[in-house]
Amino acid sequence: MKVLIYGDGNSAHIIAPMLAAAGHEVSLYTLGAPSRWSQEVAAEYWNERHEKAFTVTGRLAMVSNQPGMLVPRAEVIILCMPVNQYRPALHEIARYLRPQQQVWLGTIYGQGGFNWMVEEVQRKYSLPNLKYFAFGLIPWIARIGEYGRLGITYGGKARNCVALHPGRDFALLKQEIFDNISLRWFGTGEAQQSPDFISLTLSVDNQIIHPTRCYALAQVSGGQWDSAESVPYFYRDYDQLSVEYLQRLDDDYTRIRQELRRRFPAKAFPFMLDYLALERFSYASSNADILSTFVNSKTLREIRTPVVQLPNGKWGFDIRHRFFSDDIYYGICIAKWFAQQLDLETPMADEVLHWVEGLRGEKLLDEQKRLQTASPALAAPFVSGLPEYYGKRDLAALLD
């Protein structure tokens, strides 16, 4: 198949060599200079002892920063970028698609309502033949070893869930794409089909991990540190307060999940899971508590807290980081929107959103703790992914 990797982030450095090595014709769209990309790309697998176990190598057919050169010839387009960039990227892609072009649009991280985003461009650009898929979680941890040439991964998840439309094409995509980005190389990470996309949006890890950890760090330190070296590691130094906040936010999500099941009993939602259940499914782990999932992780321990130097010389949170632009505006805000439609309270989500308001100087909630959906902080083009911004307000229509 002719596969276009759309984006040049960490995950692109893993998925491109894997699909090319599996026999696909792989091209890549980059925001930077195409000359920075080697024609031969590789993904190295490093085991838990930090030893290189094997390397997957493939060749790129084309690299360009001109989407018009790449999109019209693609059969599968996979987005590799932060979630908040999906919508503008899809609108850009859609402008170069032929009306009758048969193409799959996909992402390997499908939280935040990816299906709503695709349906938005499908309507706007009259593209009746669009098909789409999304993984619930990224199949592996990805790092860039050398930009444009080498990616590093620490192995795949035990299992992955994937939603797609139309669902009848799962076997084909599994054989051609899904198996070739994990199972073929690691012997693990087989894709299982989710009957709906909403489970991917409401079964979350990053969206509750990142904001609550940052919020807990802010409560302990005030959110500022004298030096970059004094900032706690994000996971290695994970503490009990961070656990408490994560659990409380997951409890907010659980109330939403439970109420959706109660109101729509005909829907199975087999992959709509709480945090620990999702962690056990994804990693086949036996972790009984949240803290151990982080402090015992050999692959997460080197990840640092995203900070920048502030005008006062100290170091504070990088409020432009995807921990905010993805996990708040395409994460917690979406959950809050569902809670409002279901008449549910979300005390921890409200607490985190109020903190973000002060940090970013924005207004997200009104005096009744309801989302200010007309506020530019939410309603500006592509800033957030509330269902009503896609013209969707009927809950039943959002559950496919």
Image (cartoon, helix red, strand yellow):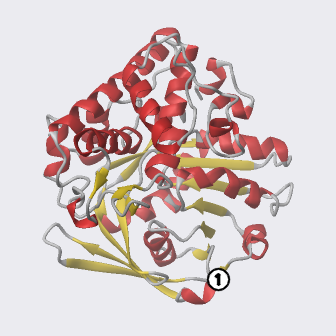
Residue 300 percent location from the top left of the image? 24, 58
Whether 46 is drawn above or below 177: the answer is below
Q: With 11 as the anchor, is 103 left or right in this view?
A: right
* Residue type beneath disc 1: Met
Front-most of residues 231 and 294? 231
Please provide percent x and percent y for residue 94: 78, 56
Q: Position of residue 4 (x, y in %)?
A: 63, 69
Question: How many marks are shown on the rendered structure?
Answer: 1
Residue 303: percent from left, percent from top? 28, 61
Depicted 143 relative to depicted 388: above or below: below
Displayed quadrant of residue 165? top right
| Residue name at image x 63 percent, y 36 percent | 378
Q: Is residue 387 left or right of residue 288?
A: right
Quick one: label 1, few (<14), some, or many (20+) residues within 10 Å? Answer: some
235 vs 358, left or right, is left
Residue marked by disc 1: 62
Q: Quadrant of the C terminus?
A: top right
